[in-house]
Image (spheres, rainbow, N blue to C red):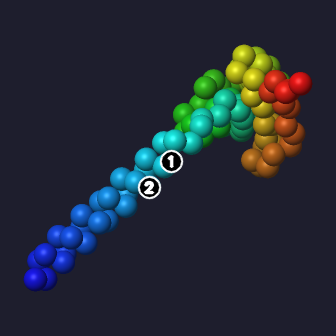
């Protein structure tokens, strides 16, 4: 009887993990671009990504790249300070009229 309970408990846990992960897959991905400090330089990183899109020596260069991508995908640019705090946000999303 104890074996049945542990097997059933394991099956329930697996189903919970499966359903919870499928819910997170249904979230719409965003194309917002973050300009962030990265290895003594600046980087552009798409929101939700671990990898960077591009690395730049100057924040201004990274900002231009992020603006170009945000315009293309009707998204926002989120600009961070050297300490990681958000400094500014620029929106390129299409407005509903």
Q: Is residue 37 left or right of residue 21?
A: right
Q: Residue at x 25, y 72 (%)?
A: 9
Outermost residue, front side: 97
Q: Quadrant of residue 62?
A: top right
Image: 50 above or below 56: below
Q: Residue at x 71, y 38 (%)?
A: 37
Q: Is residue 15 left or right of residue 75?
A: left
Say which residue label 1 marks.
Answer: 24
Q: Quadrant of the C terminus?
A: top right
Q: Is residue 64 left or right of residue 20?
A: right
Which sits in the foreground, 42 or 72?
Answer: 72
Q: Quadrant of the N terminus?
A: bottom left
Q: Secondary structure at mark 2?
A: helix
Instruction: Find residue 7 and name its label.
Output: none
The picture places residue 35, in percent across and down from the top left corner, at: 74, 33
Count of labels in the image: 2
Say which residue label 2 marks.
Answer: 20
The picture places residue 92, in percent across and down from the top left corner, at: 82, 25
Mark 2 near mark 1, Cβ–Cβ under 8 Å? yes
The answer to whether one can see residue 92 in this image is no
Cα distance between the residues tagged 2 and 1: 7 Å
Q: Secondary structure at mark 1?
A: helix
Q: Residue at x 40, y 54 (%)?
A: 19
């Amino acid at each position: 009887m104890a074996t049945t309970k542990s097997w059933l408990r394991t099956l329930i846990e697996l189903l919970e993990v499966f359903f919870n992960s499928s819910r997170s897959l249904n979230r719409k991905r965003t194309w917002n671009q973050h300009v962030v400090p990265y290895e003594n330089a600046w980087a552009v990183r798409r929101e939700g990504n671990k990898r960077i899109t591009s690395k730049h020596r100057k924040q201004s260069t990274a900002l231009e790249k992020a603006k170009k991508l945000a315009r293309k995908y009707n998204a926002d640019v989120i600009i961070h300070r050297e300490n990681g705090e958000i400094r500014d946000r620029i929106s390129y999303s299409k407005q509903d009229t």
